Image (cartoon, grey):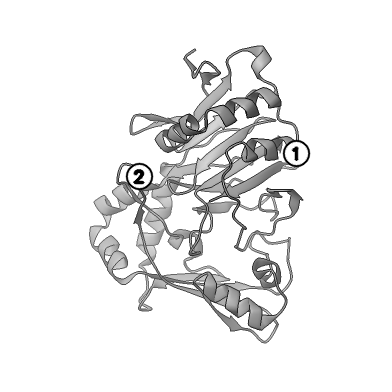
Amino acid sequence: MEVVNNEFEVGECKGQKLVDGEQMPLVLRPAEAQKRGLCSLVATLKANKEWFEEKLLQHSAVLFRGFDVRDAEGFNEIVDAFGWDDIRYVGPAPRTHIHKRVWTANEGPLSEFIYYHHEMVLINEFPTKVILFCQVPPPEGGETPFVPSFRVTERMLEEYPDNVREMEEKGLRYTFTAVSKNDTTSMRGRGWEEAFGTSDPVEAERRARALGMNIEWLPNGGATTILGPRPLTRVFPGRKARRMWFNTVVGMHGKETSSATMADGSEIPEHVVKRCGEIIEEESVQFKWEEGDVLFLDNLALLHGRRPSLPPRKVLVATCK
């Protein structure tokens, strides 16, 4: 096995893919048995921040496996090792705060598939990194698949160049309807009060505008948020000038509580959305969680989701600027 930085052994995992010459995810294991402890891992990361950030940019996903990470407190130490600023989650997923920077991942029913997305893609300020920790791996299913976003853009340009050009020129418009209080029976059941951190509608509107959205109030106390125009793709520094499929058209188009259209109100053709969903699935990277896994995702380069699973499953998350 290749040893990198004298601290890590490059490993493998089932489902790993070679994408544009790079392994996704890059799997790092302890080079020696005495280096698998949490303190050793945290110290190594603190001493090699720049090296690790380069690896994350290069591979888009880095999976630490075989280290002694047991709980939210230990996971938080790993996140803190880099000194990255925290970013508060804004979105529809019901979540619970666990410890300092650590939250539960989406608490919606495990039987439901959480569709691929860039975290907080619709908000003006979104995280650059999403970090996940598997405390309890599910007995079946429950993978966190991810997708190299630039590959979706490349393939959509190959198959639907005119539609892509029209969406790029016009921009996109989204709507999402939220209840007032949290509903954990839905994977999109986060209430607007928790999402905006207030029960005051006036303050909620102010905070929504700061995030780049408007609110329409509903008779039942719920709210419809309106966002747009938003871009279809984006290019971010340090990522080989790749055009990322930085939108959530497939996830929100034609749904019961959400919509995605072009910014002028014209519809996105159903067959284009359907084929885009197929491409995203074809390009996905799937791997099985193991206890103690810590997965770093470049949120600017990858979409991610959650497969349905049997209980129990406990995956925690931190998001960083």
The disc, 1 or 2, on the residue closer to the chain's N-terminal end is: 1
Measuring 49% from the left and 36% from the top, which residue is drawn there? 61
Numbered label attached to residue 142: none
Whether residue 141 is visible: no
* Vertical placement of residue 149 versus 174, above or below: above
Measuring from the top left, give residue 139's x and y in whole percent: 71, 35
* Residue on which disc 2 sits: 151
Whether residue 283 is visible: yes
Drawn side of residue 98 relative to residue 246, left or right: right
Q: Amino acid at mark 2?
A: Arg
Drawn side of residue 56 relative to residue 237, left or right: right
Drawn side of residue 55 relative to residue 207, left or right: left
Measuring 65% from the left and 67% from the top, which residue is drawn there? 195
* Residue on which disc 1 sits: 73
* Vertical placement of residue 38 versus 217, above or below: above
Measuring from the top left, give residue 247's x and y in whole percent: 43, 59
Measuring 59% from the left and 55% from the top, which residue is drawn there? 87
Q: Residues within 10 Å of mark 1 (few under 14, many from 20)?
A: some
Measuring from the top left, give residue 258's x and y in whole percent: 53, 70
Badge 2 marks a residue whose secondary structure is helix
Badge 1 marks a residue whose secondary structure is helix
Measuring from the top left, give residue 110's x and y in whole percent: 69, 49
Q: Amino acid at mark 1?
A: Glu
> Between residues 153 and 90, which one lies in front from this camera angle?
90
Q: Residues within 10 Å of mark 2 (few under 14, many from 20)?
A: many
* Vertical placement of residue 173 versus 248, above or below: below
Measuring 31% from the left and 41% from the top, which residue is drawn there? 240
